[in-house]
Image: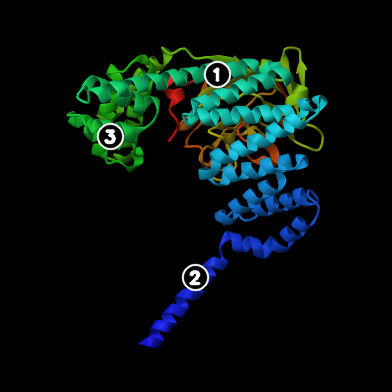
Amino acid sequence: MATRIFCALLIALTLAAAARAASPDDTFQQLYGDQVRKLKAAPRGQGEVDFARKLLSDAKDVADDKPFQALLCNKAYDFASTHADGYAVAADAMELLAKTDPKSRGPAMDKALEMYEKRYTAAAVTQRKTVGPPYLDKLLSVASDKAGAGAIKDAGALYNKALKVADSIDRSRASEIRDAIKDLGTKQAAQKHLDELMTRLKADPTDAATAGDVIQVLLYEQNRPADAAQIAATLSDPAAKRALPLAGKDPADLSEEELTDLAEWHQAQAAKAPDAIKAVAYEQAGRCYAQFLKVHTADDAAKLKAKRTLEVVQRAQAEADAKVPHRTVDLLKLIDPSRDGVKGTWKMAGSALSGASAPGDPVASLRIRYQPPEEYDLKIEFTRVKGNECVAQILSHGGHSFLTVEGGWANTVCGIDVIDGKRADANPSTQKFPQVLKTGARATVVVEVRNRSVTVKLNGSVVTRYATNYANLSLYKAFWDIGDGQLGLGAFEGETLFHSVQLTDAGNPAKSAASAK
């Protein structure tokens, strides 16, 4: 017995020692301990930034070991961030950490922004035109993140700082930033309204009307179904008690009976909701009816009823959405071809923007310096004047970049590039045609970016549509890398004239405040 106990203890101690040896800190010491000791013994600043670059490069090679990858990113930041020539490396390390570890995103992006700011403030005035634009982009990106997380005060401070930077380096972006500040004020007013409702409900928990208003705001404006369900649990309304716990689930996980119950409840809410959130309630009802039709295989009365009701709901949603004013921004006015072109040759040709591929590289790409809202329409009028390949739009939703393509693969493919690592000619969005574009003919493309889908219309006809939460979308960076989270234009193997580039905020105040699931 004593021998068995001893063996068990020995095995346990051995396993514990192995676990300790495999810890990220121990692995770091094994791989880099000697280099760290040499750096500490050397005069400060000698080799530290180069070592940080090495750590960052290694971090990209250990994507399947998240704890160790996070440690390498943090170490790279520590070694690079105290040196002016290391600010860019430190920022890259934090951006990699934010991308690979969502839980660390907020603090990591704050550190990255700090590095951009230090690089900007340390630069000579003559250099600020170069380092200023990426700093401005990062200010707007982090401000947008904070606004989405409800940190309104912090977001406002960053937007105001961005306005001052734009005034120094690029005044053409001031209107974009003022629009963002205006949107932030709308969100702040919405949050104040919710706070007032919550105070009223706390004073009188039996006030069913106020409780209903709170539920609508939480569910449709702020996309907080769990909090709305907690409020519903205090009510005597059995329909709300049954529906709200379902509202937080993916419709694909609901039974046919649950889908019907939830859809009817959303419809009832839409009928009594204010215009600002009516369309959102109808949209939720429509999703439930659409899922019901997807899983209900019998051709019976229930299926016919769901189909007819879905048509009614979709019409009601469109009517409600039309009542909310949508802001349109002329993006063409914000573009400076010499500054914003990434690949190829970009220039103004009269009132149009010309983009052409250069010898040796088939891609012409350009970055548009505008932070898009959560849901939007990008409308582009263009003429392909040379070539037989695609015109493309680089888009972003929630930090996920992707491409929509018209006329790719020898003018035969429309689709979204990339989905789950697959290009636009071989993924679920792929649509093939004998001929997509006519060289020399003016065309209009509208890309509708919504929280749960992307739709592309060419000359008024839908050429591809894909339902997505955007997590599986990415850019084919060998061709189209203009930076994550950016808007852009593209042309392939030819020349295209862009006559008009407009972005319309497609969300009403409720949609703009709610985040995608």
Identify the element where label 3 is drawn.
helix
Quadrant assignment for the C terminus: top left
Q: Mark 3 points at which residue?
A: 230
> Does residue 341 appear anywhere in the picture?
no
Label 3, residues with CA under 10 Å away: few <14, some 14-19, many ≥20? some
Q: Which residue is drawn at 47% across and 17% down?
A: 186
Q: Residue at x 41, y 12 (%)?
A: 323
Q: Mark 1 points at which residue?
A: 181
Identify the element where label 1 is drawn.
helix
Amino acid beneath label 1? Ile
Against 284, is 417 above or below?
A: below
Q: Nearer the viewer, residue 148 or 86?
A: 86
Q: Nearer the viewer, residue 300 or 202?
A: 202
Label 2, residues with CA under 10 Å away: few <14, some 14-19, many ≥20? few
Q: Residue at x 69, y 62 (%)?
A: 33
Left or right: 264, with 380 as reference point? left
